[in-house]
Image: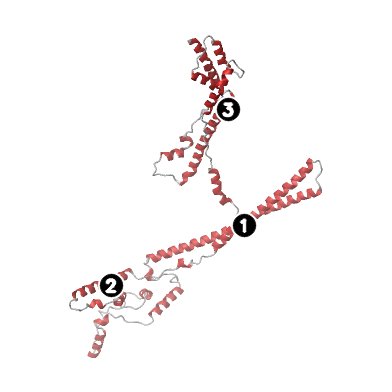
């Protein structure tokens, strides 16, 4: 009995081994991509921390290396798909149904018939050939079960290859820079050449406001006024009297500030002349030529005269500066004369602005803005000129394309005449020569 069962199992096993030997699969050995050699930038980026990030200059190299990895993965996927298709076709061709039928019979454990080993052996051998065998009637009864077994197999899910859209996106981004120049773009350049309406606003120097010390002094006086008025009101509330500070107002504060400014602005000697006049006098007059007032003798005067002089030189009158008429006109005339003689420049700033850092920085930036605006205007003129030239060249290139089409039409007519074994007519030849000469003249204009 054991011998019979071994004979029965030997047939399907030997048949399966022979089928596996005939398998057309090639079993490719995929070589992995060496990242250190082929993709050094990609390997270096992976080794970094998240804080380091990726620089802009590394993007081009990274794109090339990632495309290399993508092409390698796509190649492996295509090979695997081809192997899967080969395996599927081979199963359909070599009679996979018979192989499954025999396996199904042995899984069900059908007991072999004793005394007929040769018949079972022949049934096992019958699976090797397409010809009919002794076990053919049994296959009709098992056919529905075989169909059920085949439908239980899941179809192979073929992985979808990702579409490489990088070249399309690259050329789409480059296309606007390589497209033809249109008339709208030329009009845009012409509009850019027009000076903006607010250009003069950028070169205006705003008026100098009140100094911070004066503003702070005014604020302090107002605050003291409010505090004093509040304190006096609280102290004199029972008596019904108002403090003297409550009568002050903002106008009084401004008057006090102007008075103090006039006192501080006036120099000790009370000279009414301007700074330029004083500098000119200092340059022309030597020092220690005039003796000081302490060394000069004091003349004796009568009581009346001394009383009048004493009244004029009283401590109250010493603080009042003496007035000289036409000091401002004298200052301006001296400045004009010095400019005319070439000793001063016309654009020199006055002495009071020499220490104004904000004004100096503002004028410096305005000068830079003028230079930059002039440079941009020059470049816009050049760009407009080149754009107009390119538009004319585009028209010539369009004429060249039309001439090429005419030349090709003439060539087709001549070739059709030769294929028909007839001589081209004089009209066709003249038309061909005419189109060639027109094309050559357009090319000369384009090259010139």
- Of badges 3 and 2, the one in the foreground is 3
Q: Is residue 77 above or below residue 201?
A: above
Q: Is residue 241 left or right of residue 411?
A: left
Q: Quadrant of residue 299?
A: bottom left
Q: Which of the labelled discs sits on residue 389, or is there none?
A: 1
Are circles 3 and 2 on residues that touch, CB within 8 Å?
A: no
Secondary structure beneath label 3 = helix
Asked if one can make out residue 193 in the rendered structure from this viewpoint, the answer is yes
Residue at 24%, 81% in the rendered image = 315
Mark 2 vs mark 1: which is more N-terminal? 2
Label 2 sits on residue:
222
Residue at 74%, 45% in the rendered image = 411
Secondary structure beneath label 1 = helix
- Which quadrant holds the C terminus? bottom right
Residue at 49%, 19% in the rendered image = 108
Residue nearest the viewer, comparing 205 with 215:
215
Q: Is residue 42 above or below residue 244?
A: above
Tell me where residue 416 appears, x and y as whole percent.
Answer: 77, 43
Label 3 sits on residue:
89
Secondary structure beneath label 2 = helix
Residue projecting furthest to the top: 115
Tell me where residue 129 appears, x and y as whole percent.
Answer: 60, 18
Q: Quadrant of residue 98?
A: top right
């Amino acid at each position: 009995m054991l011998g019979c069962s071994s004979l029965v199992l030997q047939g399907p096993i030997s048949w399966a081994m022979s089928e596996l030997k005939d398998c057309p699969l090639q079993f490719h050995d995929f070589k992995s991509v060496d990242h250190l050699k082929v993709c050094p930038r990609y390997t270096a980026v992976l080794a970094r921390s998240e804080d380091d990030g990726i620089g802009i200059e590394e993007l081009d190299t990274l794109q090339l290396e990632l495309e290399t990895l993508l092409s390698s993965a796509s190649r492996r996927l295509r090979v695997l798909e081809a192997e899967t298709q080969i395996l599927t076709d081979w199963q359909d061709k070599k009679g996979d149904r018979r192989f499954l039928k025999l396996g199904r019979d042995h899984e069900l454990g059908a007991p072999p018939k004793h005394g007929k080993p040769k018949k079972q052996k022949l049934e096992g051998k019958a699976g090797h050939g397409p010809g009919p065998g002794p076990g053919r009637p049994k296959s009709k009864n098992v056919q529905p079960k075989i169909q059920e077994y085949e439908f239980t197999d899941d179809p192979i899910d073929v992985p979808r290859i990702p579409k490489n859209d990088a070249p399309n996106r690259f050329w789409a981004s480059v296309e606007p820079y390589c497209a033809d120049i249109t008339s709208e773009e030329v009009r845009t350049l012409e509009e850019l050449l027009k000076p903006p309406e607010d250009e003069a606003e950028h070169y205006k120097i705003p008026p100098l406001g009140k100094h911070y010390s004066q503003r702070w002094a005014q604020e302090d006086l107002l605050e003291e006024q409010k505090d004093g008025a509040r304190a006096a009101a609280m102290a004199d509330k029972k008596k019904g009297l108002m403090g003297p500070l409550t009568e002050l107002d903002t106008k009084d504060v401004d008057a006090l500030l102007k008075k103090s400014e006039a006192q501080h602005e006036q120099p000790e000697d009370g000279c009414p002349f301007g700074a330029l006049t004083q500098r000119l006098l200092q340059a022309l007059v030597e020092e220690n030529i005039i003796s000081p007032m302490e060394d000069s003798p004091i003349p004796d005067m009568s009581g009346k005269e001394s009383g009048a002089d004493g009244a004029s030189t009283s401590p109250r009158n010493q603080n009042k500066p003496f007035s000289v008429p036409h000091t401002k006109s004298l200052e301006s005339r001296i400045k004009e004369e010095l400019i005319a003689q070439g000793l001063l420049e016309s654009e020199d700033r006055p002495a009071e602005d020499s220490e104004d850092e904000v004004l100096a920085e503002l004028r410096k930036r305005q000068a830079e803005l003028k230079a930059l605006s002039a440079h941009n205007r020059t470049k816009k003129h050049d760009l407009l000129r080149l754009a107009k030239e390119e538009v004319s060249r585009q028209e010539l290139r369009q004429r060249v394309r039309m001439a090429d089409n005419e030349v090709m039409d003439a060539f087709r007519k001549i070739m059709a005449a030769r294929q028909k074994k007839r001589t081209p007519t004089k009209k066709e030849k003249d038309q061909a020569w005419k189109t060639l000469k027109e094309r050559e003249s357009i090319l000369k204009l384009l090259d010139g």
